[in-house]
């Protein structure tokens, strides 16, 4: 991959491109799952290329995954609480041994934060449900909740609307916009639904075979001939003349 780009603080930035373009690999490099063979990753003015995923999370970087990464045997509440783990001064063991001390107060504070997220994403009715029993759309929402629980300044969303019906997509788009506008999170989103991308994104970047072929405002991307050819399936060929009767 040969990619060089910058996302501004507070921006809702989308990445599109055909399958195999390198979109998820790039998020993996940003989040620390992959180590780039060349170049560097910077966040808040700091080189984070050599930091672990947990160290990046502690700096305020959260993400969701294309393939759901929930603990299927745990409740929704417990799955979301996992997102707070790096912020806890006391371990889960310490909390059980010293329930009436500082650990109890800390746990309650984290639970209050998680409950705010549950209310925001409108999943209070499933808070005690086992994650593995939920529909795909609800599990995607729980995964978003866990990423938000990290308390990120930057959240990476890998196809957050994949496999959803129209109503679920509309809800998810609304949550993402609210996270950006009301919660102040910078968002980098990979998404194949072009309608959603063009509707909610402030800027869009297009990848093709590991390189950037276009970046700009949504309407600029829609009008870009190279993008039309590479991703939108439009070429410069003229339509064939209709056959004569």
Image (cartoon, rainbow, N blue to C red):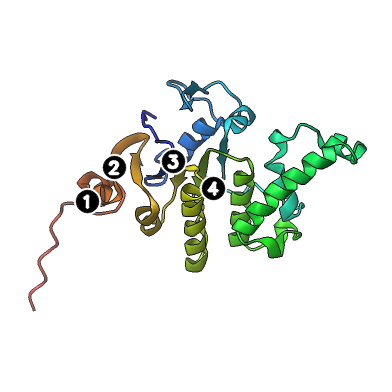
Figure check: 174 above or below 5? below
Q: Nearer the viewer, mark 1 or mark 3?
A: 3
Give the residue pinned by disc 1: 223
Q: Nearer the viewer, mark 2 or mark 1?
A: 2
Nearest to N terminus: mark 1 or mark 3: 3
Task: Identify the residue at image location x=90%, y=40%.
Answer: 100
The answer to which quarter of the image holds residue 130 is bottom right
- How far from the left and from the top, in percent, is residue 103? 83, 37
Q: In the drawing, does residue 23 fall left or right of residue 231?
A: right
Give the residue pinned by disc 4: 66
- How far from the left and from the top, in percent, is residue 9? 43, 36
Q: In the drawing, does residue 38 fall left or right of residue 77?
A: left
Disc 2 to disc 1, C-alpha distance: 11 Å
Give the residue pinned by disc 3: 10
Nearest to N terminus: mark 2 or mark 4: 4
Nearest to N terminus: mark 4 or mark 3: 3
Figure check: 211 above or below 158? above
Of residue 18 and residue 155, the one placed in the foreground of this image is: 155
- Mark 1 secondary-structure assignment: loop
State which quarter of the image contains the C terminus: bottom left
Say few, some or many: other residues with alpha carbon within 10 Å of mark 2 (under 14 / 14 to 19 / 20 or more).
Answer: some
Task: Identify the residue at image location x=64%, y=44%.
Answer: 149
| Mark 1 touches mark 3? (CB < 8 Å) | no
- Mark 2 secondary-structure assignment: strand
Report the label total: 4
Disc 4 to disc 1, C-alpha distance: 28 Å
Give the residue pinned by disc 2: 216
- Mark 4 secondary-structure assignment: loop
Disc 2 to disc 3, C-alpha distance: 16 Å
């Amino acid at each position: 991959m040969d990619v060089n780009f910058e996302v501004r603080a507070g921006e809702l930035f989308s990445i599109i491109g055909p399958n195999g373009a390198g979109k998820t690999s790039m998020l993996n490099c940003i989040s620390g799952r992959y180590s780039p063979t060349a170049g560097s990753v910077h966040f808040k003015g700091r080189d984070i290329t050599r930091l672990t995923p947990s160290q990046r999370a502690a700096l305020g970087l959260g993400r969701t995954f294309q393939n759901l990464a929930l603990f299927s045997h745990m409740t929704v509440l417990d799955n979301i609480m996992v997102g707070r783990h790096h912020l806890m001064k006391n371990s889960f063991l310490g909390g059980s041994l010293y329930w009436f001390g500082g650990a109890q107060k800390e746990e309650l504070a984290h639970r209050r934060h998680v409950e705010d997220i549950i209310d925001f994403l409108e999943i209070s009715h499933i808070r005690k449900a086992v994650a593995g029993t939920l529909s795909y759309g609800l599990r995607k929402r729980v995964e978003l909740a866990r990423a938000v629980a990290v308390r990120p300044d930057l959240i990476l969303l890998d196809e957050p609307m994949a496999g959803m019906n129209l109503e679920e997509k509309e809800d998810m788009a609304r949550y993402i916009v609210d996270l950006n506008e009301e919660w102040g999170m910078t968002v980098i989103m990979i998404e194949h639904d072009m309608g959603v991308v063009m509707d909610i994104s402030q800027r869009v970047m297009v990848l093709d075979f590991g390189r950037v072929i276009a970046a700009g405002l949504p309407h600029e991307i829609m009008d870009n001939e190279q993008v039309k050819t590479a991703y939108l399936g439009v070429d410069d060929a003229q339509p064939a003349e209709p056959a004569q009767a």
